Amino acid sequence: MSGPRRGDDCGSIRFTFDGKELLARPGDTLAAALLANGIGLVARSFKYHRPRGIMAAGVEEPNALVTVGTGGRSEPNTRATDVFVYDGMVARSQNRWPNLAFDVGSVLGLAAKTLPAGFYYKTFFGSAKRWMFYEWFIRRAAGLGDAPSEADPDRFSQRAAFCDVLVVGAGPAGLAAALAAAEAGESVILVEQDSLLTPSLVRDPQELGPAWAQATAVRIRALGGRILLRTTATGYWDDNLITLSERLAEPGEQPPNGTAQRLWHVRAKRVVLATGALERPLAFAHNDRPGVMLSHAVRTYVRRFGVVPGQRVVIATNNDDAYLTAIALRDAGAEVVAVLDTRPAPAGASSGFPVHNDTMPLATKGARHHLREVSARVDGKIVRWQADLLAMSGGFTPVVHLHMQAGGAALNWDEASQSFLPGAARQSVTSIGAAAAADPVGPTPSPENPGKAFIDFQNDVSLGDVDLAWAEGYRSVEHLKRYTTLGMATDQGKTSNMAALGRLAEKQGVAIPEAGLTTFRPPYTPVTMGLLAGRTERDAGAHLRRLALYEVHQAKVPIWQPLGYWKRPRAYPQGTETLAQAALREARGVRQAVGMTDVSTLAKFEVSGPHAAALLELICATTVAKLAVGRGRYTFMLREDGLVFDDGTVWRLGEDRYLLTSSTGGADRMATHISYVRQFLCPQFKVSAVNVQEHYAGIAVAGPQAKAVLAALIGDEPPRHMSTTSATIAGLPVIVLAASYSGERAFEIYVEASQAEPVWAACEAEVIAQGGCLYGMEAMEFLRIEKGHLVVGGEIDGRLTPHELALGGMLNKADGFVGAAGLTRPALTQPGRKQLVGLEALAGTIPEGAMLITAPGQPAEGHVTASGLRVLDGGSIALGQLNDGFARRGELLLASSTTRGQSARVRVVAPHFYDIGGERYRD
Amino acid sequence: MMLITCSHCGPRAQTEFTYERTVDSVVQPDADPAQAMEQLFTRANPRGLDDELWRHTFGCRAWLVMTRHRVTHQIEAIRAVGPEALP
Amino acid sequence: MTKYSALGLLRGVFNGQSHWQPAWRDPEPKANYDVVIIGGGGHGLATAYYLASVHGIRNVAVLEKGWIGGGNTGRNTTLVRSNYRQKPLHDFFEFGLKMWEHLSDELNYNVMFSPRGALMLGHSDADMTMLAQRGDAMRVDSIDAELLSRDQVAKLEPQLDMSRDARFPIEGGLIQRRGGTARHDAVAWGYARAADRLGVDIIQKCEVTGFVQQGDTVVGVETTRGRIGAGRTAICVAGHSGHVAAMAGLTLPVESQTLQALVTEGVKPMINGVIMSQSLHCYISQSDKGGIVMGGDPDNWPSYAQRGQPMVTEGAIAQAIALVPALSRLRMLRTWGGVTDMSFDGSPIIGTTPVPNLYLNGGWCYGGFKATPASGWTYAHTLATSTPHPLNAPFDLDRFRRGDTIDENGVGPMPNHR
């Protein structure tokens, strides 16, 4: 192709292709602008790197893929036919080196005869490493464009909408349907993937023209309807949910307000599919050469974009529609040198063009990557035409993708048009216009040289490949697709599917509908990943919850630690302290004086009513009913399979009022569990169970001076260990629980979250006055390990029974709780199961998570669940799970972490190291 | 994505709901242990209609029993459970 | 049977590749077989192959209701690894991983097993400890695992977002360098071709509609192509285990749910190995064709529809972009769903059933692909000898009732809590 293909008005929009500065008119697609600038070679194919041009004018384009935009905005594999040129657009060809016209990768084409469909299954044997050697080259030759290497600078938004009628496609049929619905008083959303309404009326002007379209759109909008251009219905899901992707900026373009695209989830009462039809190419040798185009597309370029893609034209068709293209070309000044019609005479006889019946192209030849000659067998003789454009039409395939996704598996075969038409659908969906009916076509003869007759252009799949797959036994349509990669390219087989089915049916000797049909899966056209992620990708969809006391902590510049949905202070380093130094100082502060920490994230449930105790007796595996008012108790909960999944404390605040606490990480799970038991297992109970996790902020005060701190704060005698009282601190009502997780006398103070700051401030002042400090989770971990308290996710890993966690003595003997039945399973009492142990290092530090082994090379008998130290005396200690651990006290083992190159000799001991008698809890 | 008609709230998107378990898997706390384990660890799992327990987790939080088709996803019936639904 | 080789392909230059024979026959079912395997997925075909090749049992039929490899074999994200924490699982999958390393040669079919490394990211010190524990557990059993620093991870996968202020900052990772991906279809086809060569009948478009029982004992199957007698009958139908077993009166510890996956348009290499995460639920790899293949959480509700709900994939994509920001401008090309047979401890079931002569292989949840060779090997052993192989002995059907569950995630019996 050479020289501009457009008149004097070259346009005023400046863009570049492979660095060359070019001009476009407003409304041009990149494909139209490239053709207008005389650029026919646009891309290289996937497998053989064959030169490729522009074949289509819409989303079905298999060949003309380019990268548009720069930096984090660059979009590889953009169809040149589906991007509208904007000022400053940067477009680049891809999958070629060093350049498009001279691509080293095209040597693969020379080797094509050794690389038939599925060749890679038959070679590259040897070790996996050897395959990886070949694969390195294959991976680099494959792929298409380059992915951006920077983060996306733009936003993507999401919206939900509801309507009575969603009309997909604003062609004449869709526009009329939308108007009818709007006039009937229905709420209407009309979407069109193109940038203008009724593009087909621009291609084929009829009585109804663009003026009618504009007037109709005005009327629809006046009736409250919504019309979205550049919007594609990409997926059809259950209960008439349709996903739309709306382009607010073109690929690679800087969006005017920062938002590049919008994703819609639309729930429609009914859906009208006016999705039109796609033209099928014809299969003949070298039908993939730049200059070979679909007939409809040629007409679109001539009439809509004012670009005449060739001056000497051969038309190849099996239907009447292509004659309209011949007329359009003739009107535009091109010469139609031949029309090859597969149908017998008198088809085309009255057209006035040089028609040759019963024939189609035999092959094409080219020069400088463009069509130069078309040959065909006419009356038994090979005839050749010099031509720079071949417009082909193999008939039309209604776009039934969304219909099929809607559960409309039933497609009706229409012999006359050689296409599938939408049949019955499970959901409320109808297809209209060209999506529901196609014009009749004549025969589609088989090519003489199937090896170079491409059907899937992007993936270089020819009819010969289909034949090979058949010969090798890949005979179902799905095997064929997967073996040849047909239909797997970015065009999703829009132009190749029917040709493949036709060939398959021919091989099987059956009609096409019996050959099978592949499933059309969402999306209809590829959808930008960032759009699907929406705004949530910055936090991976997991929003961070903020502690009520966040600002207070932040002012002290703590080291934060992620925990569940939250971050909690891990330690409050002073000066140049490391985490370990700070945590040890804080833990010692607790052991020697007093410390305070934020425990707000603990799960908390308020259970009240006459059946409160009965509900808790179901949920907790310990007794609750005997708890006196004002007293509390440690408790744990079982899943129905009898294994411990959480623990906490239960407090009787009043006659019929309890507070249950459990782990932070398991809070949602516990909320669901309690709700299930209450709502489903015992709906007859008179009880209310309310999740108060974030209603209260919690402050723990622990240490020998804790009682003094509390006394000063509440102006009264603090409650005894495992007792509770209500009190006032800083003028605010609080609940005080005398519970300890550290081994020291300790209290948890709960206050309404919105009022936490003054209570925290009062506590802090008193703690500092008593010579205490703040402590974080790291110190808390040291303290609880030394005391032998369990943690959910550590010792409590969802795999052990209460007995194995040394909690058996606390089990409710009355049964009846959730999990009691599961506990009776025989294997749970067999020897060899894991049991909780303490470990002390003979020397060195016990690595957390390490395997417990008797000697190197021996199997793992358990592992270290948590590693700490004796806070005051030093010395590495740990908790762990060990096979038959209870009976192995005194045994020496190796705690070995080979991934970290750490190990320590350990002695198995009881799982508590500090104040075993609980003396420090006594006043 | 299904449209689920919550007995309390009316039609809502499936994303507001969580599936919890099948009704045939429900273990009553006073069930005989062997029977309870049979119940807990087997499912009819039909390729057709089954009764399922769902929760309107991100809505009214109520529990619902849905009779739903496992292939078409058609919801044949839906009823509220819990104290309010007691006769 | 033409042997596959580079020479064979060269020969094809001169004959238009016309010398290749069908990869498997298309036989009519015989009246009786020693073993009838229900389900022509990778596992069923591998079982048939090992019955024939290891145990000399060649009078075997594989019955497939559609086309072989058309279920979960062709719907997964092709990951191969053995980096499990629990011993019975990592021993089983490691046995399989060793088989993967020689599978292409064994089958004379390139299954494109590519050990480019399976990397699990850690996002906190707690994550790193969990990863170390997993790695230590593997290494005790002689399975490769290597703890990586932040810098090592960044070097391995330069596209990862290493910023400190990320919602899930990357602190390091655990890599199994011998893990990677394979070509899923090729696994089914390779086993089918190799089994066929040993005399196994692969019968497609043959749906089992019932069991033939004498007393309790299964002696054959009713199919859409007539009654077929069977010495032993082996269920191997993944997501359809429940309703196939129900035809023999069995109810299983299995619930069928949907798992979705997706692939983007192809791009030049940007992801080197397999990326997973200790805190996030997405897994990312890049196929040889250049598409980014990824998946996330299962849909977590029962379905046989092979169709999920779109917000689940949208959530997985958000996580993937959080890890690899450059994915944002790629385009999702295809999305699909598979019917996964979620077991009640997350581990598979391979072994005998209470029904005499009926065997079960199922409960693979969303992790069955990588198990294909080991599953076939151990199931064939179980079928041939009536006793489980030591590797599948822990995965018996009765373990739930007994309490011997193998719960990798420690979340108990509800599959949707996993």
Image (tube, coloured by chain):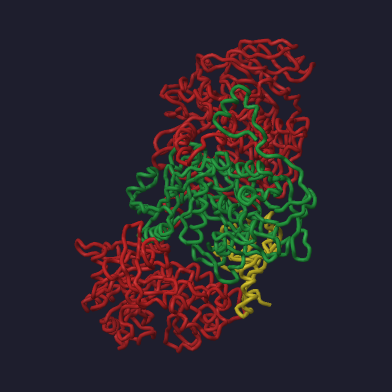
Chain colours: A red, B yellow, C green
Q: Is residue A891 above or below residue A24?
A: below
Nearer-the-camera pick, A398 or A381: A381
Where, by quadrant of the figure, is residue C249 drawn? bottom right
**Rendered residue at 38%/80% (across/down):** A735
Which residue sits at x=65%, y=18%? A328
Question: Viewed as shown, does residue A160 lie left or right of A404?
Answer: left
Q: State which quadrant residue A302 falls in.
A: top right
Could one spot residue A182 in this view of the protein? no
Whether C228 is drawn above or below A18: the answer is below
Where does the N terminus of chain C fall, quadrant-wise? top right
**Does the image show residue A179?**
yes
Spot occupied by residue A566 in the image (x, y as percentages of width and height): 39, 63
Image position, residue A680 (x, y; %)? 61, 73
Residue C170 left/right relative to C240 = left
**In which quarter of the view is residue C304 placed?**
bottom right
Q: How many marks?
A: 0
Q: Between A646 and A746, which is closer to the camera in this rendering?
A: A646
Q: Position of residue C149 (x, y in %)?
A: 33, 52
Question: Quick one: which residue is furthest to the left in this view?
Answer: A575
**Residue A905 spot, x, y in % from top left:** 31, 68
- Viewer-proximal residue, A100 or C353? C353
Residue at 46 percent across and 44 percent down: it is C115
Q: Is residue A756 left or right of residue A643?
A: left
